[in-house]
């Protein structure tokens, strides 16, 4: 009887030992898995990747300047006009009360061989499609320098949002263009620039 008691006590001890043996490695490994994330966290003490440089918001206004009724390079018979390179436009925006009635008056890039120009407006608070107008600013040649569109120097062209530009440049809040091409014309019909 006593031996069976002993053996059952020994059995209980053995079971406990097996139990502990089974549990301990498990706890050890669970501790290890707890430790590991700490290891992975270590890189966070290394310098964090530098944040991307701030993107400056910008509004892009684009357009074309043509020379009316002159057959120059790139002549468009439908418009009866040709691209006028090296001309400039002005974008003028009239601020409201919030902008303290400031006036933005920015000169475009000189037109390229396609008559294309661009104005980058970084003073985005000043830009409101409804209070901004495009004007002819300068012609590269006296031979095509008479304002034609707009013909009245006081009446600028209104802007529309460019729907065809689906991929905007970084920071661009919007791209706008004049409803029509801007145009100069020769002061005397037929007296066109030589290019
Ligand atoms: C435009 O300007 C550039 C630089 O001033 C000049 O080299 C070029 O000949 C001009 N083009 C026209 C068509 O006037
Ligand atoms: C914008 O600036 C140009 C060049 O200085 C000037 O000729 C034009 O009158 C100005 N427009 C306005 C509305 O201030």
Image: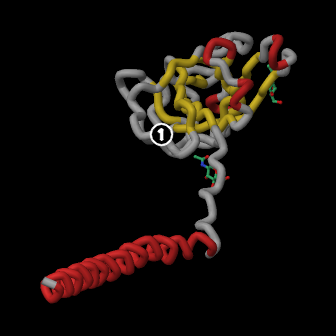
Q: Would you place residue 136 above or below residue 48 in this image?
A: above
Q: Quadrant of ligand 2?
A: top right
Tell me where residue 162 appears, x and y as whole percent. Answer: 46, 26
Residue 190 at least partly seen: yes
Identity of the residue drawn at 32% across and 82% down: 25
Which quadrant of the structure image shows residue 15? bottom left
Q: Quadrant of the N terminus?
A: bottom left
Provide the residue designation for mark 1: 168
Q: Is mark 1 within 8 Å of ligand 2?
A: no
SS at mark 1?
Answer: loop
Q: Nearer the viewer, residue 171 or 91?
A: 171
Identity of the residue drawn at 69% across and 30% down: 124
The coloring applied to the image is secondary structure
Tell me where residue 49 appears, x and y as whole percent. Answer: 59, 67
Residue 60 shown left or right of residue 91 in the figure: left
Tell me where residue 48 appears, x and y as whole percent. Answer: 61, 67
Residue 173 shown left or right of residue 17 in the figure: right
Which quadrant of the structure image shows residue 86? top right
Identity of the residue drawn at 15% across and 89% down: 3
Q: Nearer the viewer, residue 165 or 181?
A: 165
Residue 91 shown left or right of residue 163 in the figure: right
Which quadrant of the structure image shows residue 133? top right
Residue 141 at least partly seen: no
């Amino acid at each position: 009887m006593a031996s069976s008691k002993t053996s059952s006590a020994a059995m209980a001890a053995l079971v406990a030992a097996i139990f502990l043996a089974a549990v301990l490695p498990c706890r050890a490994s669970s501790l290890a898995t707890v430790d590991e994330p700490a290891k992975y966290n270590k890189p966070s003490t290394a310098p964090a990747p530098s944040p991307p440089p701030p993107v400056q918001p910008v509004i892009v206004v684009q357009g074309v300047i043509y020379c009316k009724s002159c057959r120059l390079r790139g002549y468009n018979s439908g418009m009866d006009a040709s691209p006028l390179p090296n001309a400039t436009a002005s974008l003028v925006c009239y601020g409201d009360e919030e902008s303290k009635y400031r006036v933005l008056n920015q000169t475009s890039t000189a037109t390229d061989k396609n008559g294309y120009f661009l104005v980058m407006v970084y003073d985005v608070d000043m830009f409101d499609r409804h209070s901004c107008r495009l004007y002819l600013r300068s012609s590269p040649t006296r031979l095509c320098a008479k304002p034609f569109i707009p013909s009245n120097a006081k009446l600028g062209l209104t802007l529309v949002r460019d729907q065809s530009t689906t991929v905007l440049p970084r920071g661009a809040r919007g791209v706008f263009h004049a409803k029509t091409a801007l145009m100069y014309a020769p002061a005397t019909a037929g007296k066109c620039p030589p290019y």
